[in-house]
Image (cartoon, grey):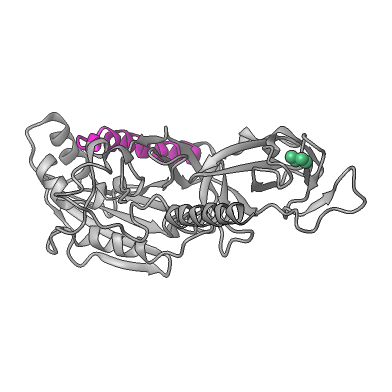
Amino acid sequence: MHDYNNPDLNHLNQGTQPLDRLEVFGNWDAVPLGWYALCPTKEIQKNKIKTYKIMGQQIVVWRDSEGDTHALDAFCPHMGLNLAQGKVEGKQVRCKFHGWRFNDKGSCTHIPCAESPKKTSKVQSYATEEQYGMIWIYPEELAPRPVFIPHDLRGKKLDWWHMKPLKRKCHPHAPMINGIDAQHVKAVHDINIVPEGSIRMRDEDTLEIYLGSEIPNGTTLMGKLARWFLGPYYAYINSFVDGNIALLNTVKDVKLFGKWKAPECNIIYSIQYRERGESNILPICVTEKRNGLLSTLRTKSVLLLTKIGFEVLKNDEGDEFFEDLRFRHDNLLAEFDRPIETLIEFLNSKPLSKWSTNQRKAIIKTEKMSKSSLSQTMDC
Ligand code: FES
């Protein structure tokens, strides 16, 4: 069964408008490897443990007495209590139900009523990192690289503002196309976006799509203000990192009032969902943190400018399309939809994590098991 976007729409028109299932893009079963923003750092104090859902996975995360964070699958391997009900002991966590204790690698280190812990009693552990005021989780014990930082900001001190999460009743991959959908920008906003010759791999994990447009001599106040403030030309870059982080770098190569180079504004989006059927995209405005009174003012001004840009984009007419969309990809136009096609190919090439599920396989396995238990019962 096809399961893009809003699952409520999945079953409709299957006879007349069947859809193919893609390997990763829009596929709820496929969870690409990459860093996912789990919660604000301040939510987990020292010696506290909490539980979260991320990409259909129940996780516990705790902060030990030295301030380091650790994450495990939530359910105790003994009888399945959520470990968040337990307590933190140094770097370890103890389950409340029967007192089994687990270290930060997920190994059982103590069972109160047994002399030695069962070697098989292991919980999956995950790499964590704190960046942009968030705790991030990687769906493997070790992460191959740190959380993504925009190339221009690497090696610099960072400042950030968290924006309100964008919640949509669709798979989070669908809204990712909004900024690179040239036909939509023309049809809805009457702006000519020019995507030609502007797609490249920045490094092995980052797809970069550079888009530019002339700011039309609009009749609306906003259009006039935009042209007066930003000049006649506007460009921005959408970057896609792994399968789950997007970076919008706005006002690229723009001169304010046609004279002064505008500061570049970066919005990082953690592309994710908590549970199937509802995406939960976390936008974070990021810039270089500068010291000194005037420099701090400049830093905050850039963040404010980014936030204003974000609010304008958020109220972008057309966002509501994603509430009522069963995305399909087989009629894209090579001339205009090349960025979208490239993004879909890019995502479909991403390696999957162990959070991916194959429910069909699970159902078949269950059916086989029940058949074999049935035959055993009949043999008896
Ligand atoms: S359920 Fe956790 S120790 Fe028994």
Residue at 27% x, 55% y: name it: 253
Q: Nearer the viewer, residue 300 or 243?
A: 243
Residue at 54% x, 40% y: name it: 53
Quadrant including the C terminus = bottom right
Residue 194 lies in quadrant: bottom left
Tag count: 0
Determine the main secondary structure of the stretch shown in magenta: helix
Query: Horizontal and vertical percent for residue 20?
Result: 25, 57
Residue 280 lies in quadrant: top left
Report the residue that reaches farthest toward the right.
115
Q: Is residue 94 visible?
A: no
Tell me: 102 left or right of 180. right
Q: Nearer the viewer, residue 105 or 289?
A: 105
Check residue 299 for magenta coloring: yes
Tell me: 193 left or right of 7. left
Residue 196 lies in quadrant: bottom left
Query: Horizontal and vertical percent for residue 144?
Result: 57, 65
Q: Nearer the viewer, residue 72 or 95?
A: 95
Tell me: 257 left or right of 80. left
Q: Quadrant of ligand 1?
A: top right
Report the residue that reaches farthest toward the top.
221
Query: Horizontal and vertical percent for residue 79?
Result: 71, 41
Span of residues in magenta: 295-320
Q: Is residue 54 visible?
A: yes
Q: Nearer the viewer, residue 292 or 303?
A: 303
Query: Horizontal and vertical percent for residue 310?
Result: 33, 38
